[in-house]
């Protein structure tokens, strides 16, 4: 009888240990599932958590308001420049057009590309409409009061400075491409020289990471 009880006790102990081990395994697995995925490894600069930007009120090339609400629920690629730019802006917008083409229609369905002028004195909505459409029909030109533009550029770390030459002037400016996430935060930036294939791959990796969080 004592031997029978001993065997029964050992059986119950084994069952209890197995149950505890299973519970510990489930707890560990749940903990691993809650661990945030590693940040994507990209050629550009990834900003974990995103960087907020200032509030602003601008106009797109059709005359519609361009405010932080435009960033909600979609990804946005921003570039700053001016239509009289002789080389940097055309090169950057051409690169962005190739990024869009490389990603394909399905991948870019919820991605907007906005070219924001730092020369509102000359860059009217009409001027921008003709300019950005030359590079891609889906590109959006943006302008507005310089004070509003400075709010945005200042919060994003975009430098720009007017230089006068007699009766004319030019503007020195950053050529970075910025990626804004669906929460309206700066998620990544790509500095020159811009490689369309690398940028397209980076955006795909960032979006995959975003969906896993």
Image (cartoon, rainbow, N blue to C red):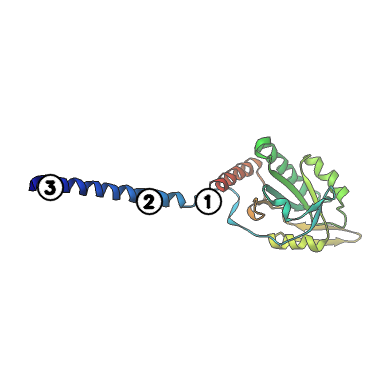
Residue bearing the label numbered 2: 28
The span from disc 1 to disc 3 (Cα, nearest Å) is 56 Å
Q: Nearer the viewer, residue 168 or 174?
A: 174
Q: Nearer the viewer, mark 1 or mark 3?
A: 3
Q: Nearer the viewer, mark 2 or mark 3?
A: 3
Residue bearing the label numbered 3: 5
> Residue 39 got which mark?
1
Few, some or many C-alpha atoms within 10 Å of disc 2 (few <14, some 14-19, many ≥20)? few
Q: Are marks 2 and 1 in contact (CB under 8 Å)?
A: no
Q: Which residue is the extreme one toward the front?
A: 1
Residue at position x 58%, y 56% in the image: 49
> Residue 154 got which mark?
none
Q: Can you give x and y, in whole percent of width and height, for residue 115 in the image?
A: 76, 50
Few, some or many C-alpha atoms within 10 Å of disc 3 (few <14, some 14-19, many ≥20)? few
In the drawing, does residue 123 fall left or right of residue 191? right
Q: Earlier in the sequence, mark 2 or mark 1?
A: 2
In the drawing, does residue 99 fall left or right of residue 12? right
Residue at position x 73%, y 60% in the image: 153
Give above or below for 98 relative to 114: above
Q: Earlier in the sequence, mark 1 or mark 3?
A: 3
Q: Can you give x and y, in whole percent of width and height, for residue 48 in the image?
A: 56, 56
């Amino acid at each position: 009888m004592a031997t029978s009880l001993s065997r029964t006790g050992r059986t119950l102990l084994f069952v209890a240990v197995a149950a505890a081990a299973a519970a510990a395994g489930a707890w560990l697995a749940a903990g691993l599932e809650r661990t945030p995925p590693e940040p994507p490894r990209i050629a550009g600069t990834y900003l974990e958590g995103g960087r907020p930007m200032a509030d602003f009120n601008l106009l797109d090339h059709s005359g519609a308001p361009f405010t932080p609400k435009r960033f909600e629920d979609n990804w946005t690629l921003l570039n700053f420049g001016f239509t009289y730019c002789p080389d940097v802006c055309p090169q950057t917008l051409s690169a962005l057009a190739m990024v869009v083409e490389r990603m394909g229609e399905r991948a870019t369905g919820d991605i907007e590309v906005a070219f924001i002028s730092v020369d509102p004195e000359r860059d009217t909505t009409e001027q921008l409409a003709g300019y950005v459409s030359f590079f891609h029909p889906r590109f959006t030109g943006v302008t507005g009061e310089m004070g509003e533009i400075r709010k945005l550029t200042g919060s994003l770390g975009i430098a720009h400075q007017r230089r006068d030459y007699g009766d004319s002037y030019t503007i020195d400016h950053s050529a970075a491409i910025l990626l804004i996430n669906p929460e309206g935060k700066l998620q990544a930036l790509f500095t020159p020289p811009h490689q369309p294939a690398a940028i397209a791959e980076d955006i795909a990796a960032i979006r995959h990471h975003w969906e896993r969080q």
